[in-house]
Image (cartoon, grey):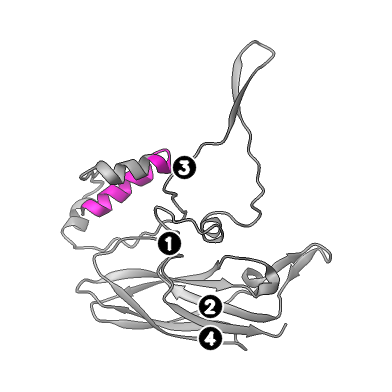
C-alpha cells in the first residue's frame, strides 16, 4: 500500500526531481476518494492503471532569460530547442541509454503475471502470446507490444505499436493476439511526401512496460 501511495503522490508533484526526493524520504500518503483506497488496501480490487509517460530521475529546467516588455515589465522566457525528432518520452531514454525513475507503461498490482509463447504471423502481420496470472489475486494486466524497425530506418529505440487489457483470475491464462498496424511500422519519406514500410526484419517485443519486454520474435516484411 505504501509503494502505491508513494507513486500516486509522486505523480502529483510538479517535477520529477520532487518525485525522486519524495520516494527517498516519505513513508506514505493517501487520499481516499469514494472508498477506493480502502478497497485497494483490503485487496478487494486490483489497480491496473499504467503510466502514460516516462518520469526521469533528475529533471533540469530549460535555460531561462529575462527581457523587459513595452510596459517596463520583466518577463521570463524559455529557450527551447526541439532537435530530438521522434526521440521523445521512453524512446529518448532508450536511445540515450538513460534509466528513468518510472518507465513508460509501469504500474503496480496485487498479483503477478508471466508472459510466454510469442509467435508472429508474417502474412497476417499479427503477434500472439499468452499472459498468465501467477499470483493469488484477480487482476488486470496491460499487455504491451513494441517493435524495433530494421537497421535501414536508423532508429535506435523501439516503438509501442499495440496493447490489450487482460483480466485474469488467479492461475488463469489467456491468449492475446494483436494486429500490427502498417502505419505504426512505417517511416516518413520526404522525397515522396508519404509513409514508407521498409523491407527487412522487425524485432517484436512483448511485456508489461517499455523496460520489461521478456518476449522477442522477428517479423519479416518483404514490402
91 inside magenta stretch: no
Which residue is identified by label 1?
A: 105
Q: Are marks 4 and 3 in contact (CB under 8 Å)?
A: no
Which residue is identified by label 3?
A: 59
Q: On the rendered structure, is 176 left or right of 190?
A: left
Circle on res. 149: none
Which residue is identified by label 2?
A: 204
| Residue 93 screen position, x and y as percent | 51, 56
Circle on res. 120: 4
Residues under labels 2 and 4: Cα distance?
A: 8 Å
Q: Earlier in the sequence, mark 4 or mark 1?
A: 1
Residues under labels 4 and 3: Cα distance?
A: 39 Å
Tell me the crowding category of disc 3: few under 14, some 14 to 19, or many 20 or more residues within 10 angstroms, Cα based: few
Tell me the residue at 61%/27% (across/down): 77
Tell me the residue at 21%/71% (across/down): 137
Quadrant of the image containing the C terminus: bottom right
Q: On the rendered structure, is 52 left or right of 147?
A: left
Q: Are marks 2 and 4 in contact (CB under 8 Å)?
A: yes
Closer to the camera in the image, 15 or 142: 15
Amino acid at each position: 500500500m505504501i509503494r502505491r501511495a508513494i507513486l500516486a503522490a509522486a505523480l502529483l508533484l510538479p517535477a520529477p526531481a520532487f518525485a525522486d526526493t519524495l520516494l527517498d524520504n516519505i513513508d506514505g500518503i493517501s487520499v481516499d476518494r469514494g472508498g477506493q483506497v480502502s478497497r485497494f488496501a483490503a485487496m478487494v480490487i486490483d489497480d491496473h492503471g499504467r503510466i502514460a509517460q516516462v518520469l526521469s530521475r533528475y529533471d533540469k529546467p530549460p535555460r531561462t532569460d529575462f527581457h523587459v516588455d513595452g510596459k517596463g515589465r520583466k518577463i521570463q522566457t524559455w529557450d527551447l530547442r526541439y532537435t530530438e525528432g521522434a526521440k521523445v518520452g521512453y524512446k529518448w531514454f532508450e536511445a540515450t541509454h538513460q534509466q528513468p525513475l518510472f518507465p513508460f507503461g509501469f504500474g503496480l498490482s496485487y498479483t503477478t503475471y508471466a508472459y510466454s509463447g510469442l509467435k508472429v504471423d508474417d502474412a497476417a502481420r499479427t503477434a500472439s502470446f499468452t499472459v498468465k496470472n501467477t499470483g493469488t489475486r484477480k487482476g488486470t494486466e496491460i499487455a504491451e507490444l513494441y517493435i524495433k524497425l530494421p537497421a535501414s530506418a536508423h532508429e535506435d529505440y523501439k516503438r509501442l505499436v499495440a496493447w490489450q487489457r487482460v483480466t485474469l483470475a488467479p492461475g488463469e491464462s489467456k491468449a492475446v493476439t494483436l494486429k500490427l498496424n502498417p502505419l505504426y511500422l512505417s517511416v516518413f519519406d520526404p522525397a515522396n511526401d508519404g509513409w514508407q514500410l521498409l523491407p527487412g526484419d522487425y524485432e517484436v517485443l512483448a511485456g508489461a512496460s517499455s523496460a520489461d519486454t521478456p518476449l522477442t520474435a522477428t517479423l519479416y516484411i518483404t514490402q
